[in-house]
Image (cartoon, grey):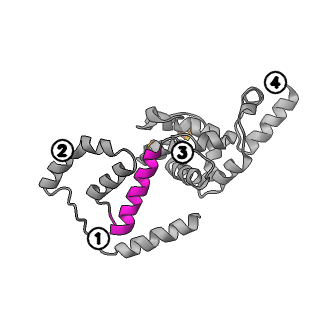
Amino acid sequence: MSREDEKNSINMLEEGIYISPKFEKDLLPEFELSREFFEEIYSMPGGEKVKECIQCGTCSGSCPSSYLMDHSPRQIFAMIRAGMRKEVLESNTMWYCTSCYYCYVRCPAGIKITDVMYALKRFALKDKDMKVPDNRPVRFMECFSAMVKRYGRNCEAIFTILYYLSTNPFRMLKHAVMGIKLFIRGRMPLIPKKIKGADDVKKLMEYVEEMER
Ligand code: SF4
Ligand code: SF4
């Protein structure tokens, strides 16, 4: 490594960017890098901690969904720190995060990984130029939010119908028998009851949505 490379490397490390000079020279020119991206992540509450990722892989090893993800949580943190905005936001990783918080409690650097996954979802939806790779998790989230906004809670029957109608109606048939059995046993009512304070929940959600615009 030349003295200049070494100096660059130290500067980048001080800024919380962990890229080896070799990686930067050979691979990164293939990607469009965005300094604003990691600055955005670092500026969210607790986001500064992302700089402290030691790439130990505990998050990836703990994550029950990592086998479905384009990039494991560990890789996503390396990519955020490299400023690979498009690759991160167009990946399916955050959409397969089930918010189980397993990585969150195990990360030795104390990084709020689940919160970062939520932030990545918001960034991906906000930026219309980003192509969300699989619309199912997005529809799932939208249908769930619609239920909570309306009834203050989820209503499985209506949620399932809405979700499958907006993704793949034929898949609904696959679960129809189970749905009917649940309905007969009174475990999946078709007419949901609003919880007490549902209107306040709705106002709260609208307020948060407004803040995120
Ligand atoms: S567990 Fe924490 S420190 Fe380790 S790779 Fe994941 S985010 Fe980085
Ligand atoms: S919170 Fe998300 S990223 Fe973390 S282990 Fe659970 S599913 Fe994986």
Earlier in the chain: of badge 2 and badge 1, it is 2
| Residue at the left extreme of this rendering | 185
Residue tagged 4: 1
* x and y percentages locating residue 94 in the rendered image: 50, 45
- Specify the amino acid type for callout 1: Lys
Residue tagged 1: 194
- What is the span of residues highlighted in magenta in the rendered image? 135-153
Earlier in the chain: of badge 4 and badge 3, it is 4
Quarter of the rendering containing residue 162: bottom left
Q: CA distance from mark 4 to mark 3?
A: 39 Å
Residue tagged 3: 132
- Residue at 66 percent across and 53 percent down: it is 40
Q: CA distance from mark 1 to mark 3?
A: 32 Å
Quarter of the rendering containing residue 3: top right
Label drawn at residue 177: 2
Residue 80 visible? The answer is: no
* x and y percentages locating residue 177 in the rendered image: 18, 44
4 and 3 marks in contact (CB < 8 Å): no
Name the chief secondary structure element in magenta.
Answer: helix
Instruction: Determine crowd level at label 1: few under 14, some 14-19, many 20+ residues with C-alpha closer than 10 A.
Output: some
Nearer to us of marks 2 and 1 is: 2
